[in-house]
Image (tube, grey):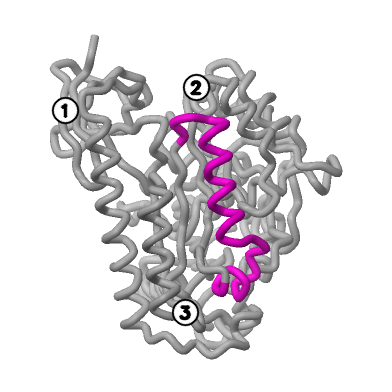
């Protein structure tokens, strides 16, 4: 595609939302590059002439950020600094018709599964032989590995199936080949992501096959850490934990969104699980993999939530003492079954409840971090920032969890592993020195 200028086109991809969107952007940019098109992620130099905004449509705040980003790019186009603005991703999939009327300056809109169509706008061919080839937007030592697309769950608050469709697993062989390519490029850690990891394989192999996939990935030479994100608690496949306990390169870490603990709320959210079952599951997981780090995500302010429901949740956190907790305030999403309920918790109260819950978790996090003082942990070096090195233990994922401030007299290269003795603990971070 030509812009009418002698200068060659350069495409900037702006990615909003989750790591699954990030992988989509990386795959798209890899296809553009293979077609000889200059492409970059999050370009700060403004020396590009085309922008692709990969949007998020999950909750109100994410939608607002996506719309604002599109409008910022349109303003650049109006001022002559851009030739084209394209929009893709979840927001575009869900609201394309409305948005195209409200923001007609966007040159084209694409859904979440329209990569070949998007490439046509660049006179580029979809190259099927490029399976696993991506232009990484992460540092070279870690990457996300998306093992499936879509979701078959019917959680009442969630619009993801509307935007991503039904669950489709990637074949094990394809994922192993992708992991091998990533390792050959210097990747040491992969984070497995999906809308729901534990459903993996049911469509392809007629059984839950995450454990089988983990065994194959664990055998990839040079892959030092494998991390699991977004496991659904209902019918959790316990054989996954057997593999985790057996294999040193599978992090003793699992991200398992619970959303709530009150039985009333769990039923309203259509989570297919009770408080008692959740408590037992966590106990079983800890028994199978001693020392495992369990991360969860919660929702504050779901329709009908009462003060008692919030107190139940706080009590649960104090009793079960999860390692990591994130929280969202409820967003009333069209075409979800919860949209039929009255959104009767005000925005102010939602925020207050979220703060209350996180204050409880903050104390738990500090106490758990204090227990690490004096102990030595294997740490991956992520970056140098403000004159200090920052890394993570196997119990911490990128951006959402603790960081370790590493004191070192020698230069450290990102992607290397070092042994660090923890000397100080904070609410959500650690500090330590290298042990030779």
Instruction: Mark 3 or mark 1: name the one nearer the start of the chain.
Output: 3
How far is disc 3 from disc 1 in space, using C-alphas? Answer: 41 Å
Please state which of residues 66 and 49 is positioned toward the viewer in this rendering.
66
Dividing the picture into quarters, in which one does residue 337 lie?
bottom right
Residue for point 36% across, 66% down? 81
Please tell me whether the stretch drawn in magenta is mainly helix, strand or loop.
helix
Instruction: Mark 1 or mark 2: name the one nearer the start of the chain.
Output: 2
* Secondary structure found at label 3: loop
Left or right: residue 374 compared with residue 128: left
Q: Are marks 3 and 1 in contact (CB under 8 Å)?
A: no
Q: Is residue 72 visible?
A: yes
Magenta stretch containing residue 84, yes or no? no
Residue under circle 2?
224
Residue under circle 3?
305
On the image, the x and y values in percent for residue 405 come to 21, 33
Magenta stretch containing residue 265, yes or no? yes
> What quarter of the picture does the C terminus occupy?
top left
Which numbered disc covers residue 321?
none
* Secondary structure found at label 1: strand
On the image, the x and y values in percent for residue 350 come to 37, 77
Q: Which residues are magenta?
A: 264-292
Q: Are marks 3 and 2 in contact (CB under 8 Å)?
A: no
On the image, the x and y values in percent for residue 85 come to 49, 68
Residue for point 75% across, 37% down? 209
Left or right: residue 135 compared with residue 372: right
């Amino acid at each position: 595609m030509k812009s009418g200028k002698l200068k060659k086109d350069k495409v900037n991809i702006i990615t909003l939302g989750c790591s699954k969107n990030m992988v989509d952007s990386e795959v798209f940019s890899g296809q553009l590059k293979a077609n000889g098109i200059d492409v970059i992620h999050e370009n700060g130099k403004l020396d590009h002439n085309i922008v692709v905004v990969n949007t998020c449509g999950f909750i109100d705040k994410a939608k607002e950020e996506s719309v604002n980003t599109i409008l910022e790019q349109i303003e650049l186009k109006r001022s002559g600094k851009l030739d084209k603005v394209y929009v893709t991703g979840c927001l575009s999939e869900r609201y394309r018709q409305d948005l195209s009327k409200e923001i007609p300056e966007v040159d084209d809109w694409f859904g979440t599964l329209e990569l070949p169509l998007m490439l046509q706008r660049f006179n580029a061919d979809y190259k099927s032989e490029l399976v696993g080839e991506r232009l990484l937007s992460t540092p070279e030592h870690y990457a996300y590995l998306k093992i499936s697309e879509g979701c078959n769950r019917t959680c009442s608050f969630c619009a993801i199936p509307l935007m991503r469709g039904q669950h489709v697993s990637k074949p094990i062989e394809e994922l192993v080949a992708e992991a091998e390519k990533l390792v050959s490029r210097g990747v040491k850690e992969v984070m497995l992501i999906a809308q729901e990891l534990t459903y993996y394989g049911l469509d392809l192999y007629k059984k839950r096959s995450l454990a089988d996939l983990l065994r194959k990935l664990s055998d990839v030479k040079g892959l030092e850490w494998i991390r699991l994100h977004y496991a659904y608690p209902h019918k959790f496949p316990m054989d996954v934990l057997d593999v985790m306990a057996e294999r040193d390169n599978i992090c003793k870490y699992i991200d398992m969104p619970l959303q709530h603990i009150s039985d009333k709320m769990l039923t309203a959210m259509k989570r297919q699980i009770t408080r008692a079952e959740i408590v037992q599951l966590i106990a079983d997981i800890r028994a199978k993999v001693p020392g495992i780090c369990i991360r969860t995500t919660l929702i504050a302010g779901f329709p009908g939530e009462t003060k008692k429901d919030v107190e139940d949740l706080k009590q649960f956190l104090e009793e079960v003492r999860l390692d990591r907790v994130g929280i969202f305030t409820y967003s009333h999403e069209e075409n979800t079954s919860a949209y039929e309920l009255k959104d009767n918790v005000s925005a102010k109260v939602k925020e207050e409840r979220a703060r209350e819950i996180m204050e409880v978790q903050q104390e738990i996090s500090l106490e758990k971090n204090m227990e690490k003082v004096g102990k030595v942990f294997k740490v991956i070096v992520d970056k140098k920032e403000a004159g200090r090195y920052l890394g993570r233990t196997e119990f911490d994922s990128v951006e959402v969890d603790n960081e370790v401030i590493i004191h070192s007299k020698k230069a450290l290269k990102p992607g290397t592993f070092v042994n660090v003795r923890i000397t100080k603990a904070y609410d959500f971070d650690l500090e330590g020195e290298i042990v030779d």
